[in-house]
Amino acid sequence: MTVIRVTSLTEDRFRDIVDAYGADPARWPEEERAAAAIFARNHPEVAHPLLDAARQLDAWLDAGQVEVPEDDVLDAHARAVAAFVDAHIEAGGALPVVMRRARPLPLVWATGVALAACIAGAIFGVNVSMQSIGDLRAQNVLEQAQLSDGEN
């Protein structure tokens, strides 16, 4: 006989249980199932919206289930794969390996190069303009100094 100790459950823990396991109490962790049921009964204003949303999600997920093929179909497929492998091993040939190239597509590569060139051009342009502004300021200061020396 399993002894289950009922402890109090916080709203956050109830929310975590419903988010993780859905609205069906049979899916909830056994050690917290009774406490969660008590929480749902004592706090319907919190529990009902959470359980309703979880029921909708459960129904949506259940609707998308794929039927598992019959065992004989799976067995036939497994036998076909095993026969293919055995035939290649007996023939002394290597099994075919399907791999994709590890290089990016040309469009992706070209986009990266273009972006790097734009950034480099922007940095170069900012540096050149800052340098020419500094030269203009220095020239203006020297001209003003000459004018003020000429007035004295």
Image (spheres, grey):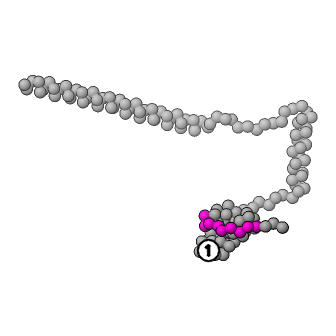
Magenta stretch contains residue 145 = no
Q: Quadrant of the C terminus?
A: top left
Above or below residue 58? Residue 42 is: below
Q: Quadrant of the N terminus?
A: bottom right
Where on the picture, by quarter, is residue 124? top left
Residue 149 drawn at (x, y percent): 11, 24
Q: Residue at x 84, y 33 (%)?
A: 94
Residue where numbered disc 1 is placed: 43
Above or below residue 107? Residue 30 is: below
Residue 47 drawn at (x, y percent): 63, 71
Residue 93 drawn at (x, y percent): 87, 32
- Horizontally, is 62 left or right of 137 in the view? right
Where on the picture, by quarter, is residue 16? bottom right
Marker count (numbered) = 1
**What kind of element bears circle 1?**
loop
Above or below residue 129? Residue 68 is: below
Q: Residue at x 80, y 60 (%)?
A: 67
Q: Residue at x 20, y 28 (%)?
A: 141
Pointer 1 local density, CA inside 10 Å: few below 14, some 14–19, many at least 20: few
- Horizontally, is 127 left or right of 6 in the view? left
- Horizontally, is 72 left or right of 29 in the view? right
Q: Amino acid at mark 1?
A: His
10 and 23: which is toward the camera: 10
Where on the picture, by quarter, is residue 65? bottom right
Q: Residue furthest right?
A: 90
Magenta stretch: give its range: 4-12
Magenta stretch contains residue 10 = yes
